């Protein structure tokens, strides 16, 4: 069958029932050009792939964290050696500026270095102290043993970095990994799989391509699901995982607030928030999506922010660094962004810059909106595009109240000249991460957990040891310290003297005051109280 005879899907649309294996066309959203095709794999194909992974996982687990470190660091070398090519592929399926495309492989190197080198420490057995003197007769051990196959399902906004974020810690934990990248941008993930094969690593990492049905196939087969994507899909995945009684972790949408206090360095805030709102054309889960500014500095901040956003260069890069902001991922994203702007304007908002498509591909102008409020979709719903709605607030308390008025709670930023004040504000925000006088800093701090509150997620990625331990089942082992002979005190047959000793010892160890040694009360238990 020739390529033209196959049923095709574009940007994730299901292929028509047809005459042969379905394929998905991948397009450059900036130009509309078809840059590749990938198979739309069935649930049956996913199941076969998972079976294959299960064959090799025990050996991967057995070589231990130090054995796995060698392979992960080889992959890191491969990422560095292939950076230019990886950025080319990334740009082809996203129309990102070159600078943005180069970030993904660099980020991957950094993350691999962290988890490859520290996994041995993070996965080492724990020997917790017994909680009471009674338990000191045992040596206690917590063992971290990986789930056999972890399913990682990713969105389209960082086609290489997003898979790496979760695939690497899962591999470092000793699990095999099946990755289902977004149908909109599957090419970079396939490059990652190519790299894994090229370095000759054990076949414990595989990529399957397709849309929602392929993802559902992964959820039906894997032993743990790590999902990043929309809240709507996350909810479906959670329900499917509950049905199978398997654990999951969900990294979902956000509507991150930025709070600019009157004592802030306004130049820094205006640059940082322009970057935080427009990086990757606003298609970042932790993009700044709404801004609250204390009244005394509102006018100055808005003027500076607008100037910074107006100055952004938009267009298609080759290998040169000529532009700051790229295209949106597809027409669906354009229509969400345009709707948010149009609905705001219809309700009285003012567009200070941007507000419409550029006319090329899916490019949308970086946009600043004022005269907005929480009744508008641009403030209440996730936009995932290049818009910055800015609101004036009377004081810090109002800023906190409005920042917390959201169903989401992914991250936030606070801009102030007083770092301690910033931390006091941070501790009152309902968000999984807060950056003071910065944006995205938490994303580059793998020692910290990255997780959303509310509808922004369940669980977290990273957080030092937790980043690999989450992919493990914890096993508790008790081992006698002294030689074991005969029967334990409380084994059958029951005797009142033994009961008395057991209950007395537990009370002595755990209770407080006279209750620890209240012999009459104990005797009452066996009817000896008189
Ligand atoms: P999406 O939910 O549409 O798709 C995400 C992935 O899920 C894709 O691979 C898709 O094919 C797959 N999928 C769809 N239906 C499925 C099903 N029923 N079962 C299994 N898999 C299924 O999200 P998107 O549009 O690709 O990405 C944008 C969203 O991702 C935004 O909401 C953004 O905030 C979120 N996101 C969150 C984070 C984070 O870390 N919190 C990071 C990046 C993006």
Image: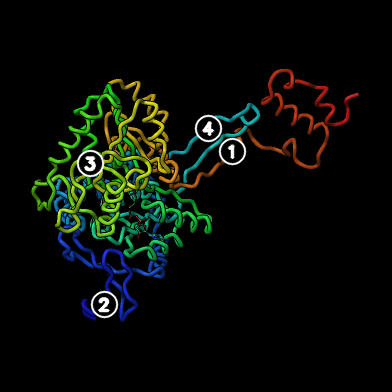
Q: Which mark is residue 479?
A: 1
Q: Which quarter of the image is occupied by the C terminus?
A: top right
Q: How crowded is the residue under tag 2: few (<14 C-alpha within 10 Å), some, or many (20+)?
A: some
Residue at the image position 46 percent from the left and 47 percent from the top: 472
Cα separation between marks 1 and 3: 64 Å
SS of the residue under disc 4: loop
Earlier in the chain: of badge 3 and badge 2, it is 2
Quarter of the image where one finds residue 389: top left
Sort mark 3 into few (<14), some (14-19) or many (20+) by Cα contacts within 10 Å. Answer: many
**Image check: 442 left or right of 29?**
right
- First in sequence: mark 4 or mark 2? 2
Q: Secondary structure at mark 1?
A: strand
Q: CA distance from mark 4 to mark 2?
A: 59 Å
Q: Is residue 440 above or below residue 188?
A: above
**Residue 201 location in percent, x, y?**
29, 55
Q: Are marks 4 and 1 in contact (CB under 8 Å)?
A: no
Question: Along the line of sight, which residue is nearer the eye, 152 or 22?
Answer: 22
Q: Tell me which label, 1 or 3, sits earlier in the chain.
A: 3
Numbered disc in front, either 4 or 1:
4
Give the distance between the C-alpha atoms of the residues marked 3 and 2, in whole angstroms: 44 Å
Look at mark 3 in the image and give the residue it sits on.
368
Q: Residue at x 30, y 35 (%)?
A: 391
* Cα distance in 3D space between marks 4 and 3: 53 Å
In terms of image quadrants, where is residue 525?
Answer: top right
Task: Determine which residue is flagged by label 2.
Answer: 6
Kindly tell me whether mark 2's CB lies below 8 Å from ligand 1. Answer: no
Is the C-beta of the residue carrying label 4 under 8 Å from the nearest atom of ligand 1? no
Q: Secondary structure at mark 2?
A: loop
Question: Which of the two discs, 2 and 1, sits closer to the camera?
Answer: 2
Instruction: Determine which of the numbered discs, if any, sits on residue 128 in the image.
Output: 4
Of the numbered discs 4 and 1, the one sitting upstream in the chain is: 4
Q: Would residue 223 be visible to someone looking at this image?
A: yes
């Amino acid at each position: 069958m020739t390529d033209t005879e196959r049923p095709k899907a574009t940007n994730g649309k299901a292929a028509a029932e047809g005459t042969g294996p379905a394929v998905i066309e991948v397009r450059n959203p900036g130009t509309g050009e078809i840059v590749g095709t990938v198979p739309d794999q069935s649930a049956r194909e996913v199941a076969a792939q998972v079976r294959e992974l299960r064959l090799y996982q025990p050996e991967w687990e057995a070589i231990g964290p130090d054995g796995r470190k060698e392979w992960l660091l080889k992959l890191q070398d491969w990422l560095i050696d292939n950076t230019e090519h990886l950025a080319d592929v990334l740009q082809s399926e996203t129309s990102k500026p070159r600078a943005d495309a180069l970030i993904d492989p660099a980020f991957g190197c950094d993350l691999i270095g962290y988890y490859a080198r520290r996994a041995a420490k993070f996965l080492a057995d724990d020997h917790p102290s017994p909680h009471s003197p009674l338990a000191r007769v045992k040596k206690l051990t917590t063992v971290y043993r990986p789930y056999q196959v972890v399913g990682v399902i990713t969105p389209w906004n960082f086609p290489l970095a997003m898979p790496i974020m979760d695939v690497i810690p899962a591999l470092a934990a000793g699990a095999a990994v099946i990755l289902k990248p977004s149908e909109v941008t599957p090419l970079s993930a396939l490059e990652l799989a190519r790299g894994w094969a090229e370095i000759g690593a054990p076949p414990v990492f595989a990529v399957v391509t397709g849309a929602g049905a392929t993802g559902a196939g992964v959820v039906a087969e894997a032993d743990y699901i790590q999902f990043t994507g929309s809240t709507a899909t996350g909810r479906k995945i959670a329900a499917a995982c509950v049905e199978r009684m398997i654990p999951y972790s969900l990294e979902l949408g956000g509507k991150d607030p930025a709070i600019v206090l009157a004592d802030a360095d306004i130049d820094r805030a205006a640059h940082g928030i322009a970057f935080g709102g427009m990086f990757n054309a606003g298609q970042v889960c932790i993009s700044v999506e709404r801004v609250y500014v204390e009244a005394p500095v509102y006018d100055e901040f808005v003027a500076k922010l607008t100037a910074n956003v107006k100055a952004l260069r938009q267009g298609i890069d080759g290998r040169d660094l000529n532009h700051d902001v790229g295209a949106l991922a597809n027409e669906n994203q354009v229509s969400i962004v345009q709707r948010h702007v149009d609905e705001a304007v219809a309700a009285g908002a003012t567009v200070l810059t941007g507000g419409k498509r550029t006319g090329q591909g899916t490019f949308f102008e970086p946009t600043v909106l004022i005269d907005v409020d929480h009744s508008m979709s641009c403030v209440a719903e996730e936009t995932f595009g290049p818009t910055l709605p800015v609101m004036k607030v009377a004081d810090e308390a109002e800023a906190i109240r409005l920042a917390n008025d959201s169903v989401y709670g992914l991250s936030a930023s606070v801009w102030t000249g007083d770092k301690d004040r910033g931390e006091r504000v941070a501790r009152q925000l309902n968000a999984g991460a807060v950056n003071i006088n910065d944006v995205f800093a938490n994303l580059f701090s793998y020692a910290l957990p990255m997780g959303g509150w509310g509808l922004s997620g369940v669980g977290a990625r990273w957080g030092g040891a937790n980043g690999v331990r989450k992919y493990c089942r914890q096993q508790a082992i008790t081992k006698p310290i002294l030689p074991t002979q005969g029967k334990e005190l409380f084994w059958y047959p029951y005797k009142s003297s033994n009961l008395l000793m057991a209950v007395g010892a537990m009370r002595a160890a755990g209770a407080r005051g006279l209750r620890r040694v209240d012999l009459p009360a104990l005797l009452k238990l066996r009817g000896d109280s008189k």
